[in-house]
Image (cartoon, grey):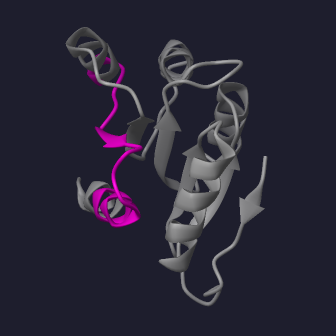
Amino acid sequence: MEERNSSRSDEKKETIVIAEDTEFFRVLLGDVLKAEGYHILFASNGKEALDVLRAHADEISLVVLDIMMPELTGKEVLERLEAEQFQRKFPILVMTGLKRDPEEIRTLRQLGIDGFISKSEPPRFFIDRIKQALKSP
């Protein structure tokens, strides 16, 4: 698990968890969001994601959760949170590079996700989608 702090430490910024096993996407998204002033927590697999969510639940503003990860998939992370009756106070955006199956979308929505991000979108899209999710009630 890695942690990177915003360079603007005098400002209170939202904390975003990036749970992504592909280092390229994890670092790219982390750098883009860090440049926007967000505090970033990283997880490189589903087990780490669960650990980060449990340990930092009160600090987290938003989670970007990859669906295909080792140890636990994004879906399995969501299922475990539901089984634990985890009281989350933050949106979860699912990130995938795969075409979304309608049945999978239904299942993920039932597990409480707040939206999707495609890995094929440019970084500006990531920022806009995350800002939009942070503003949603």
Residue 114: % across, % down: 29, 38
Does 25 sit left or right of 64 as displayed?
Answer: right
**Which quadrant of the view contains residue 5?**
bottom right
* Residue closer to the observer: 125 or 7: 125
* Residue closer to the observer: 77 or 84: 77
Residue 118: % across, % down: 35, 41
Region in magenta: 109-129
Check residue 118 for magenta coloring.
Answer: yes
Residue sitting at x 60%, y 40%: 20
**Which quadrant of the view contains residue 106?**
top left
Residue 8: % across, % down: 61, 87
Residue 30: % across, % down: 59, 61
Residue sitting at x 59%, y 68%: 31
Residue sitting at x 71%, y 43%: 55
Does 51 sit left or right of 88 as displayed?
Answer: right
Does 123 sit left or right of 6 as displayed?
Answer: left
Does 20 sit left or right of 102 as displayed?
Answer: right
Residue sitting at x 42%, y 38%: 95
Q: How many marks?
A: 0
Check residue 24 for magenta coloring.
Answer: no
Depicted 32 relative to depicted 137: above or below: below
Depicted 30 relative to depicted 68: above or below: below
* Residue closer to the observer: 127 or 97: 97
Depicted 92 relative to depicted 100: above or below: below
Farthest right residue in view: 1
Depicted 6 relative to depicted 68: above or below: below
* Residue closer to the observer: 134 or 35: 35
